[in-house]
Every structure is written in C-alpha cells, then in structure tokens.
Amino acid sequence: MKTSEIFKTKKVLSLEIFPPKRTAEVSTIYNTVNELKGLAPDFISVTYGAGGNENNTETLNIASAIKNTYGIESVAHLPCINLTKRDVLKMLDDFRKAGIENILALRGDINPDVISQKEFKYASDLISFIKDNGDFNIIGACYPEGHIESMNIVDDIRNLKTKVDAGANQLITQLFFNNDYFYSFRERIAIAGIDVPIEAGIMPVVNKKQIERMVTLCGVNLPKKFLSMMERYENCPEAMRDAGIAYAIDQIVDLITQGVDGIHLYTMNNPYIAHRIYTAINTLLAA
Ligand code: FAD
C-alpha cells in the first residue's frame, strides 16, 4: 500500500529504525521489529547511511521483511548523493521485486571523506528520477527550523516546493523540540502552496551525548525547559530516560491536539521507549 493513502482515513503513527552497524548484530533488528509490531504502526521506515555504511544492503532486506514477514507497511530510505543513476535503477528494481512501494527520497548528508557521484545534486533530482522510473509512493524530508545548509527558511521552503512539485506525496520532518517551529512552518508551507500530508518527527532523548550529536548534525534549537531537564538528570540515566519520554509525550499530545497529520517516532531501535510513548498517546491518535 502507498503510505500517502493512509492519511485520508486517520492520523498516522510511523516508526523509524536503522540497520545495526555491525554485521553480526543485524539479526537483532528482527527482534526489535517483532516488539514494535504490537504498536500497530501504520508503517516502519528503515534508514540508509549515505556515508557508505557497510550494512546498507540490509535496508532492503529489513524493509522487505517488515512488509512480507511481519505484515506491516514499510518505507525504504534512499539517499542519492553517493549513488549513480544506474545504482538507483538497480535499487528500484530490487524494491519492486520485494514489493516495497514507498521510498523516502533523500539527498543525504555531505561527507567530505566520501566522493559524491554528482549524478543527483538534490533530493528533488532523485524524486523526478524515481517518478520517471516506476510507480512508487515518494516521501520527502523537511525542516521546520530550516535545513542546516540553508541561508534562510524562505529559500528552504522554496526548495521544498520544488521537491513536492517533482513528485513527493508526503513529508516527514526532522526532529524538533519546540513545537512552535512546527506550527509556524506548517503555516508557511501552506502559504507556499504545499498541501501534502506532513508528519512531525519526534525523537525521545534519553542521553546527553545523543542530543549533542543531533545538535551538531541538524542544528536544532533546544528550548530552556529541555536544557534544564538535561542538566538536572544528566548523571542519572533512568531519570534522564523517563524525563526524555515525558518530554516527547508532552510534544506529541500538543501536536495531536493541534491537528498534526501524523507522528513519526525516531525509535532509536528501542522498543521499550516506543512502547511507553505509544501507551500514553494511543487513545489520542484514535480520538
Ligand atoms: P535536499 O532536499 O536536497 O536539500 C538539501 C539542501 O539543499 C537544503 O538546504 C535545501 O534547501 C537545498 N536545496 C534543495 N533543492 C535545491 C535547489 N534546487 N537549489 C538550491 N538549493 C536546493 N540521511 C541519510 O543519509 N540516511 C537516511 O536514512 C536519512 N533519513 C532521514 C529521514 C528524515 C525524516 C530526515 C528529515 C532526514 C534524513 N536524513 C537521512 C538526513 C538527510 O539526508 C539530510 O538532512 C540531508 O542533509 C538533506 O537531505 P534532503 O533530502 O532534505 O536534501
């Protein structure tokens, strides 16, 4: 099923997982998927490291198993910066054979240590290419606070419109910790004529290192309330985990109340945290 269809009938809950880095640990992801199955997600998406991660081939295998073994709709991430058109054609063929209908089409982060192929410059180039070469549902990434390389949010939204016009039927946001950015972004993209469903990407933060990495990578803003929480609990892992879960639930309750189309939970392959959040928001999604 094309995941863009699901938004027509309900608020969507999707989960994101990543292939374990070490080949020996890859099989553990199937235990994770098994545990996530109980949350009845509308889809599970599987990341793909643009920087040449050795386990990238697992994205296809895991997305295929989610769909064909576990009976959950899956989305395969596909960052194009280091791929040739020939690579992408091969991957589209593999997706088709595995019954994967949904692709999160991305540019990928620029890694100075990896020579980019230069056949796709932006995600919108990949989106047009996929559209011309198959009948896939194409999803795009978007950035409520603006993409880190963007000069300003206006340029970024103009580029997002290009991405949607190229064929993205659905959007998922980068994580954010201040919902006001999301609401202002939602208004701005509506004015720009972007009217595809948009899911809010929420990441429960469970340790300080994780958030420091995210801030460097994505440049997201950390509200005062969030910083105080990290400072107060940084030396007590359990309290930090519980506070991070509570913060994410608080964000989600507000987003659902304000009519968000869907929630995309960055699970960090941690079913326990996903279960706690799901238990708290399940009835709200259905109301
Ligand atoms: P683009 O849409 O190409 O945008 C990149 C930059 O170029 C932006 O600043 C944009 O404003 C600008 N731009 C776009 N089009 C134009 C144009 N025509 N002219 C001038 N400027 C333009 N990365 C991975 O490697 N693997 C993953 O699995 C992965 N999953 C992700 C999932 C989500 C939900 C999100 C939000 C991000 C994910 N990323 C992943 C990270 C993503 O690859 C990076 O954020 C990357 O830096 C940008 O990707 P993009 O597809 O948004 O790029």
Image: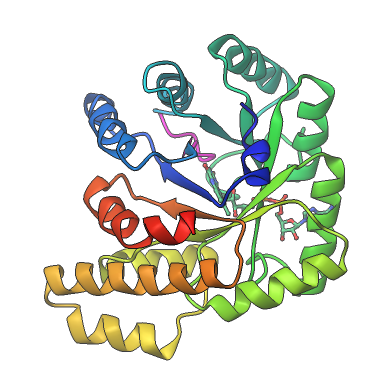
Residue at 14% x, 69% y: name it. Answer: 237
Q: Is residue 65 rendered magenta in the image?
A: no
Which is nearer the eye, 214 or 246? 246
Location of the N terminus by quadrant is top right
Which is nearer the eye, 166 or 188? 188
Residue at 77% x, 32% y: name it. Answer: 119
* In the image, residue 209 above or below residue 282: below
Can the viewer see residue 3? yes
- Residue 262 lies left or right of residue 271; in this view the side is right
* Relative image position of residue 242 (x, y in whole percent): 21, 70
Residue at 45% x, 67% y: name it. Answer: 252
Return the residue found at the far front: 287
User: In which image quadrant can residue 62 be found?
Assistant: top left
* Relative image position of residue 178 (x, y in whole percent): 51, 78
Which is nearer the eye, 284 or 122? 284
Dominant secondary structure, magenta: loop
User: In which image quadrant can residue 240 be found?
Assistant: bottom left
* In the image, residue 30 above or below residue 203: above
* In the image, residue 57 above or below residue 193: above
* Relative image position of residue 57 (x, y in whole percent): 46, 22
Q: Magenta stretch?
A: 45-54
- Residue 50 lies left or right of residue 142; in this view the side is left
